[in-house]
Image (cartoon, grey):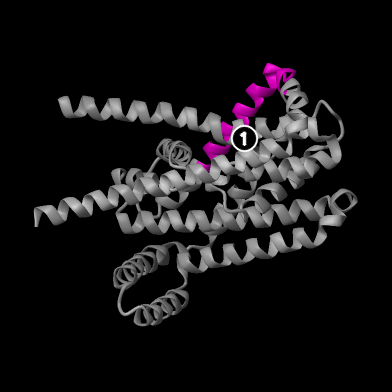
Amino acid sequence: MGGCLVRCEAGDFIQKYTKQLLKWLLVIAILVIIVYTFRDSAGPILAQLKATAPTVVIGICVMAMVYHLLEGLITTVLARQYVPDFTLRQGVTNALLCSFYRVATLGSGAGIAALVYLGDQGVSYGESFGLYMMQYALHKSGIAVFSLIFYLASCSFMNRYFAQYQWLLLAGYGITAVITLCLVLFACSRRFHYVAQRLLEWVNRKCRGKLAGQLQQLEEQCAMLEASTDRLLKRPRILLAVMAINLVKFCFFYGIPYLSFAGTGEIGFLKTLAITSLSVMLAAVLPAPAGIGSTEFVFTGLASQIVGMDTAGAVALLYRFGTFVFPFLVGGIVVVIRRVQKRRKHRQ
């Protein structure tokens, strides 16, 4: 019995780190492709980065923190439907923890970090699971809506530079719409859950019961989602408020490149929002862990049509710093502080 347990634990350990290794290998492969593609522009891009004013970097950090403040506000609004005394500080802490573990685990640990933290603050596992899925579904929906709004608002400008990519852009919108719809349905639709369970049952029968564990897990997750999201679905004003905060929130993340573009005078704020949101939406379709590499690749490809490869590449790296590296560093400080506080409590 003990030997079997050890083998199972060893197998789980190997499987876990094999997945992590494959993620890093995929990221490295994507980065190699990007470096090779833009190899002739590496020098000018670095020169652009060196010429970046410190005030631009400070502005990027401020916009990133405002984004996380609004992300924390969304978590707070949703969490208060379960725990009325949930505070904005707790919501912002959750947002920063998710940013830290999103980088540390290449995307897979953000959700787990949120569930653990929300659980520590009094939100039950089932409720936190439903809250996180609903928040993520609304986040993805907001990306598509935001991109469409600002694409239409800058339609003549976007068509002037990207008309040749029209079918590719439409395909990106179509794929994003399907992914978003599936997320929303999985978060709150009982009929979707029923169909998914029946489909997995059929596959399980064809596989002679090999997927029984996955089927049971799906049934448990669906039951938890239905129980926890019912409370949110009965409050449509809350969901509309969250969607509105999402749209404001994206203005800060997608507006980060404007701080760099402002010096060129070639791209205004609204057009920057249109290009960046479109880049993020299209990059989300690519199978890159945590979006590493894919966002830079798409953004550089689109923005280079207007400001040139050198500037576009430098701005893409600054955007990655503001949306990925800086929140990771701040989140790391939050992780250290929480661990120190927990140790002090244990000593007492």
Task: Where is residue 127? Give x, y as percent.
Answer: 35, 57
Report the residue at 20% width, 28% height from top. 345
Name the secondary structure under disc 1: helix
Please say if 20 is above or below 319.
Answer: below
Q: Is residue 205 visible?
A: yes
Quarter in which the N terminus is drawn: bottom left
Q: Nearer the viewer, residue 337 or 239?
A: 337
Displayed quadrant of residue 100: top left
> Is residue 42 rendered to the left or right of residue 18?
right
> Is residue 270 rendered to the left or right of residue 215?
right
Task: Where is residue 225? Give x, y as percent.
Answer: 39, 65
Report the residue at 55% width, 42% height from top. 27
Quarter in which the C terminus is drawn: top left
First to last magenta residue range = 49-71
Please say if 62 is above or below 301.
Answer: above
Report the residue at 64% width, 28% height from top. 60
